[in-house]
Image (cartoon, rainbow, N blue to C red):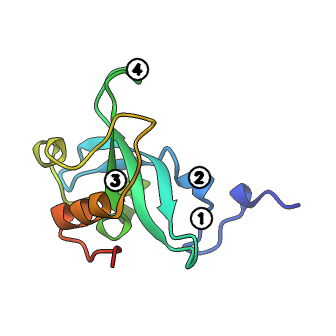
Amino acid sequence: MADVTSITSGTLIAAERVNGTNVYNPAGEKLGSVEDIMLDKVSGHAIYAIMSFGGFLGMGEKHHPLPWSSLKYDTSKEGYVVDLDKKQLEGAPSYDDRDFRWTPDYGREVDKYYGAPTYWT
């Protein structure tokens, strides 16, 4: 089987290569990096990017789900830009526990915070 992580075509990219990509605010400050992607199982569309933020050497790090629609890829930065500053991010929905369970109510809270169209009906 072909190694899809080495294949690039136009704007397509393997999810494995997105993980670890830096996320910046419009001022160019690094906010964190993409740790994972939440996909809709039926449509296959990316719905959220899970961004790691804060902490030191993995300690105290929080995970912020960002609506995929809020991320814009910047080729000059080779990373994503989101219209947030660090203070806004500190008040954003987050979780720091690996046993966290995502619920539709939590998803609606995330979408509302970022002013994104809600995925949850």
Return the disc, 4 or 3, that comes first in the chain's sequence: 4
- Do the residues under discs 1 and 2 have CB atoms within 8 angstroms? yes
**Front in this rendered view, residue 95 or 71:** 95
Return the disc, 4 or 1, that comes first in the chain's sequence: 1
Label at residue 57 = 4
Identify the residue under disc 2: 17
- Do the residues under discs 3 and 1 have CB atoms within 8 angstroms? no
Q: What is the distance, in whole Å, between disc 3 and disc 2 at their CAs?
A: 18 Å
Q: Residue at x 11, y 43 (%)?
A: 87
Identify the residue under disc 3: 65
Q: How crowded is mark 1: few (under 14 residues within 10 Å), some or many (20 or more)?
A: some
Q: Where is residue 109 in the image (x, y as percent from the top left)?
A: 22, 61
**Mark 3: which secondary structure?**
strand
Point out the frontmost of discs 3 and 1.
Answer: 3
Label at residue 13 = 1
**Mark 1: which secondary structure?**
loop
Side of 109 where 95 appears, left or right:
right
Q: What is the distance, in whole Å, between disc 4 and disc 1 at their CAs?
A: 28 Å
Q: Name which residue type carries label 1.
A: Ile
Q: Name which residue type carries label 2.
A: Arg
Say whether residue 25 is visible. Answer: yes
Q: Where is residue 118 in the image (x, y as percent from the top left)?
A: 28, 74
